[in-house]
Amino acid sequence: MKENEEIKGHLHPLTHTMFQINQIFTDLGFTIAEGPEIETEFYNFDSLNIPEHHPARDMWDTFWLEPLNAKKLLRTHTSPVQVRFMEQHKPPLRIIAPGKVFRHEATDATHEAQFYQLEGLVVGENISLAHLKGTLEEFFEKFFGKKTELRLRPSYFPFVEPGVEIDASCFKCSGKGCSTCKGTGFIEIMGAGVVHPRVLESSGIDSRKYSGFAFGCGIDRLVMLKYGVDDVRLLYSGDLRLTNQF
Amino acid sequence: MKVSYNWLQEYIKNPLPKVEELSRALTMHSFEIEGVEDMGHDSVIDVKVLPNRASDCLCHFGVASEVASVCNLERIELLETPTLSKTEKINLSLNTKQCERGFMILVRDVKVGESPEWLREKLAILGQRSINSVVDLTNYLTFAFGHPMHAFDAEKISLDKNFNYQLNIRHAKDGEKITLLNGTEYSLTEDMVVIADDEKALDVAGVMGGDDSKVTESTKNIILSMSHFNPVSIRKTAKKLGLRTEASHRFENGLSRSLAERSLPYLLKNILEITGGIVDGMVEEEPLKEVIRKIPITSKKISTILGFEVSDEEIISILAKQRIWAGQSEEGLVVSVPKDRLDITIEESVAEEVGRIYGYENIKPKKFTDTPALGLNVRFFVADKIRNVLVKSGYSEVYTYAFVKGGEVVIANALSGDKKYLRTNLGNAMGEALEENFKHLDLLGLKELKMFEIGTIFKKEEEGMHLCLGVKYPKGKKGNVDEEVARVINLIESELDVSLGDISIVGGVAEFNLNRVLENITAPAEYGKDLWDIEINDNFLWKTISPYPFAVRDVAVFVPNEVSVEKVIELINKNINSLVVRLSLFDTFVKSEKTSYAFRLVFQASDRTLTDEEINAVMNPIYESLKGEEGFEIR
């Protein structure tokens, strides 16, 4: 312990992590995109192949805004940025969209009504799940500073087909099993998949010529995993006892 | 959905692999497993069936069929669907498009009683209550094959002039009342569908049966309905009534009518064995029949999507495992999709089927070889540039909540009354954060608070990116907080080469919309090397914040001028333990031959409030050791 004159300030751990994300992905040729936090029902759901009255809507607990007939909501994911970007740009595309999202859920140590998500989208000719795996392996290796193996498992999100859940080999124990990965050697880290042709078409992209992959990952979760932060609510507490450790 | 391991075995010839191995295979190829409960003689597996596979897998047979495919096991052939003769005794009319198939079976002379043990056990393992042999049987068949089924007491149904049972599947009347099986009376609306007789509604279609026509121990004749309803209609009805049942959950996801055919032979077999009932016959109204979909595919496209090569032959044999038949055509392959696989509609869904059964582990990662031109995102550039300027100037960043108790944008379904609006400013939260953090100044080792937040605010017509600065000095500190804020605003202006105009600074807090900057800045072509250049320690672990109070002790000592401060710190360090969370030098002055050093020690435990004794046990040896040094003098 030494004399403690504070000279420099500190970045919030979410910013700290987003800086790393931005650096790694721009090095990989990704452009940073963004969209509004108040979204329309169309961009948040319909354009992503989640029609009204589809049970898949239950996968996203939603904050609706008044008046209800305006059909505005707080975006439940950063995926609307995919559609907004595709409407404005022609393939090939390679973007990430880090941003804040909202879920209508009771908060506890692992659940927050607001959190940050990292969206990724690549569209081009002959883009496949192999590119998804290659890109994300490179990202996680750089992010965790360790050789990382990815595991794809079948899952379902209406805007991708095939849809997968991605597990990363545990960066703490390299897959041997520890408390971080609950002994499994792998950590559930994000949802991803091949962009559904209906999503491409609704953004004006020819799905016979182009294909793509997309992924979505909780940034808060990355912070908690990597640095061992045990309560997500701390990230929004305005507490320097958190920030100043970074 | 809860699934019994032993029950799965009933549909598979070979012995099942151990439950752990089976769960692993399902996890990697089919579904997430949310848990396995050991029940002694059986295991209950909680399978997360997502909406895409609800059409065939919200039942034991569906899951068993997946198990057979992914564990390479042989299925037991199901009983063949019998052809039932039509009964004249049911007069069924179908008066809504929301019913895709009306399907009723009349069974006479049933003896309703307690279910046999095997049936009670099957329901019990899934946590279901046994009601009576007929109701239990309908529930069992729903969990077995996925198609909901309901039994009516036929004698409660009105008769037409020929003494036939009158059944009418129609829309409810606005305000029509019905008491359902849960004992609650519901008032229906016109968009809901009911199964009714000539007088009244008997059942809210696809959701829950009515109390009035329920099967009891005195029931003699029953009418079983395996009618089928539109998913949207059921979803809306269930939502409106606030009722989510095993039936509505299955219907709202979209089910294949073919599941009823799978169930039928088991219904007939068991109804005879368990109740002695005699099937009189059935009636059926199905305006549009289900068809087998054909999807043309090519191995080239499937390979492109998956990122590994698969041949026509491989595709045919992988799909055959799932009993999906594909044949060669001139352009490639044509896949015949089984009726129960409502999820397979396009080439991409066939690719998914091939990919997951074959195994995604076969995908070899591929990297991009090109580097496309990057666009620069000005908002990110400006925000991150400002963050760097501020951190360099001693400001620390906070994030606060977007939900507040007053504002312009109203949340219709707020979590609580004090979170009903979206924030219109960051300043309020900054004020609170300054107050809160001020209490921890010593713990943080700070002599002043300098904070900032960059975040979105919400006005009626605008979503703005705001920057808020907050500075707070302890009493007695020289300088003016507003001047400090003005100083750092100047720094931002010069770093970004923009003028921010007049910004009001009140009590050390200033806030403004960064759109002003965005409008006036000349953005560079690239982000620049140092924008995101931060020190990263991959092994850094965060230290949990103790909920217990901290305590502060100061010690000041005169030492001969030739003694270095390091030497003094070393002496103190020798005597401190883990309860000392911070040691800082807060004052130094020289008085002729001696120098005074004043240190502040902050004490805190992670698990308790510290007592004076515990703190003195650290402080006293420090005093003693300092006193013991030649020429040292405690002040």
Image (cartoon, coloured by chain):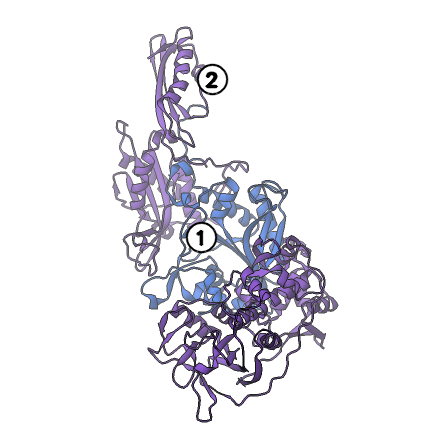
Q: Residue furthest right?
A: B313
Q: Quadrant of the C terminus of chain B?
A: top left
The residue nearer to you, when weighing A127 against A191, is: A191
Q: Which residue is mark 1?
A: A99
Chain of the residue that carries numbered disc 2 in the rendered image: B
Q: Which residue is mark 2?
A: B574
Which amino acid type is marked by label 1? Answer: Gly
Q: Residues within 10 Å of mark 1 (few under 14, many from 20)?
A: many
Q: Tell me which residue sits at (39%, 35%) in the image.
A: B547
Between circles 1 and 2, the one closer to the viewer is 2
Q: In the rendering, which numbered label is found on residue B164? A: none
- Quadrant in the rendering for residue B3: bottom right
Q: Residue furthest bottom?
A: B162
Q: Which chain is blue?
A: A
The residue nearer to you, when weighing B492 against B282, is: B282
Q: Which chain is purple?
A: B
- Quadrant in the rendering for residue B384: top left
Real-space Cα separation, disc 1 to disc 2, in angstroms = 48 Å
